[in-house]
Image (cartoon, helix red, strand yellow):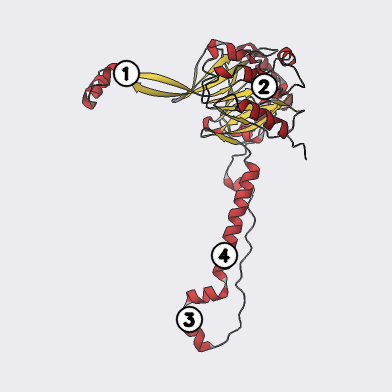
Amino acid sequence: MQVSLPISPSNLPSILPFHHPIHPPHHPHKNLAFQTQASPFDALKTSGYLSTISRAIEEEEEYRKARATVTRKGIEVEGCFIEGLSIGGHETCVIVPQFKSAFDIGRCPSRAIQQNFVFITHAHLDHIGGLPIYVASRGLYNLKPPTVFVPPCIKEDVEKLLDIHRTMGQVELNLDLVALDVGETYELRNDIVVRPFRTHHVIPSQGYVIYSIRKKLKKQYIHLKGKQIEKLKKSGVEITDIILSPEVAFTGDTTAEYMLDPRNADALRAKILITEATFLDEGYSIDHARQHGHTHLFEIIEHAQWIRNKAILLTHFSSRYSIEDIRLAVSKLQSKVSAKVVPLTEGFKSMHS
């Protein structure tokens, strides 16, 4: 039997400290006549009550800031907050709350459960393993069934995987499973669409670009006044062009070959490119990266002239690297591109820890 647990503030444990009652310090009565002449406000000031309240408010505010730092480990780039985990061979799930989307699902971090859309790039377990947990958790918390996008060649196998879990767990796993092929377009909402693009891993794979949609008045109507434009619109004339602007591109696991494909130009001009960089230094060769279907940082540097993005988020580093190694690699790429380069380092350790 499946149990529904609706998410509401009353069901969630409080993360804030309990407020202890604040007692003003006790002062013995000195002179009754003097006390009757003092205002209530003066009495509060002399008791220290207001200063005690002020200190309590300041302490709670500091606690809130500290708690937010601990629980929200993501990165803000180009006005877009991005969070998640991406450790090569372990797990990858990159979350973009602005679009209610997660790219790959990894082991299903709890933050991913609130996202309505999941884009699976390929069928390796470190990218798709948490899918049954994700779908089941959405049902557990009474959230609407999610929409999960997969390469068409794996849709049947994903359905079998979910059927096995339905049988074993005797649960409903409700979702909209969409096979979306390279070049196809799917509307996420009336102002957002997604399109897959071709990538090159050791098994079938694809990346995704999310586009924003805006309408622009056609050139031949720019000179018209408002009433004339309204009249044309009412008569059924299409007066606007639809403009697609690539906002976020996610590669998943791939060789750097995707950067040289003219059909992938939108991935390299999206506002934010989230790309893998599994290998960062001379410890592994470019040939080694290619043989395993991955990208070497040196290749991104080599093809830097094709990058038109405003920001690049590097992901999927090998677990052999420390945070210091990753920061050094970022500085090397940053010197070659105008885009802001940032790494997703959650889950990695400092060499000094």
**How far apart are the alpha carbons under marks 2 and 3?**
73 Å
Secondary element under disc 2, as helix, strand or loop, is: helix
- Residue type at mark 4 is Ile
Residue 338 placement (x, y as % from top left): 54, 26
Secondary element under disc 1, as helix, strand or loop, is: loop
Residue beneath label 4, please?
Answer: 53
Secondary element under disc 3, as helix, strand or loop, is: loop
Residue beneath label 2, please?
Answer: 297
Mark 2 vs 3, N-terminal side: 3
**How far apart are the alpha carbons under marks 4 and 2?**
54 Å
Q: Residue at x 63, y 17 (%)?
A: 302
Mark 3 vs 1, N-terminal side: 3
Q: Which mark is residue 218?
A: 1
Q: Residues within 10 Å of mark 3 (few under 14, many from 20)?
A: few
**How far apart are the alpha carbons under marks 2 and 1?**
43 Å
- Residue type at mark 1 is Lys
Residue extending furthest front?
A: 335
Quarter holding the N terminus? Answer: top right
**How far apart are the alpha carbons under marks 3 and 4?**
21 Å
Q: Please indicate, yes or no, whether residue 186 appears anywhere in the rendered image.
A: yes
Camera-near label (4 vs 2) is 2
Q: How many marks?
A: 4
Q: Residue at x 61, y 83 (%)?
A: 28
Quarter holding the C terminus? Answer: top right
